[in-house]
Image (cartoon, rainbow, N blue to C red):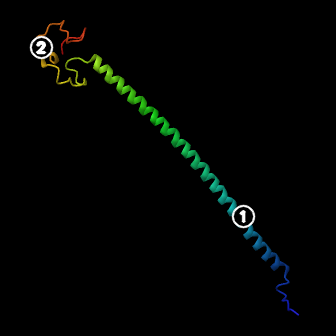
Amino acid sequence: MRRVSLASLNPLRAIGRWAAHYSIALVHDSLRGVGSAIHASEARTQGELRSFEERQSKRVGAILSELTELRREQDELRALHSFVGDPRAPSPAMSIPAGDRLVPRHAPARDPRLPAGRPHP
């Protein structure tokens, strides 16, 4: 026959063992729930971050293409409306004779090399 001590029959001690086991199980389940909630939140945040980065890269691409288009248009306008002495005008091709590229100071006001309505620089 097995001997049973009085301490093992103590109901308070049995309740204490059960409460300890149950509280450990509750803490374990709670931590698993917190861990899964953290993982779900992290996955959601990663997805939002990826979609935000994709939207930003598309926006940057659109801005850069618009800037390139505006620069091209600006270069075309400069080529059409540049005047002698314009510091931003593209340099003339070297095949053009110097007399056609340069306007002397004593050039008449109706010189075809000067744009209409603009005085000599």
Q: Earlier in the sequence, mark 1 or mark 2?
A: 1
Point out residue 97 in the picture as x, y percentages from the top left corner.
14, 19
Q: In which image quadrant can residue 27 be found?
A: bottom right
For disc 2, the marked residue is 105
In front: 82, or 49?
82
Quarter of the image for the C terminus: give it: top left
Q: Residue furthest right?
A: 1
Point out residue 60 in the picture as x, y percentages from the top left corner.
45, 36
Residue 98 left/right relative to 9:
left
In front: 17, or 80?
80
Q: Residue furthest front?
A: 95
Q: Residue furthest bottom?
A: 1
Residue in the image at 82% along x and 86% along y: 7
Point out residue 55 in the picture as x, y percentages from the top left corner.
52, 38
Marks 2 and 1: in contact by CB < 8 Å? no
Q: In which image quadrant can residue 103 be found?
A: top left
| Cα–Cα gap, marks 1 and 2 | 92 Å
Within-10-Å neighbours for mark 2: few <14, some 14–19, many 20+: few
* Up/down of 99 relative to 19, above or below: above
In front: 2, or 47?
47
Foreground label between 1 and 2: 2
Query: Mark 1 falls on what kind of element?
Result: helix
Total of numbered circles in the picture? 2
The amino acid on which the numbered mark 2 sits, given as a three-letter code, is: Arg
The amino acid on which the numbered mark 1 sits, given as a three-letter code, is: Asp
Residue 99 left/right relative to 34:
left
* Up/down of 111 relative to 92, above or below: above
Residue in the image at 34% along x and 23% along y: 74
* Up/down of 23 relative to 4, above or below: above
Point out residue 69 in the picture as x, y percentages from the top left corner.
39, 27
Quarter of the image for the N terminus: give it: bottom right
For disc 1, the marked residue is 29
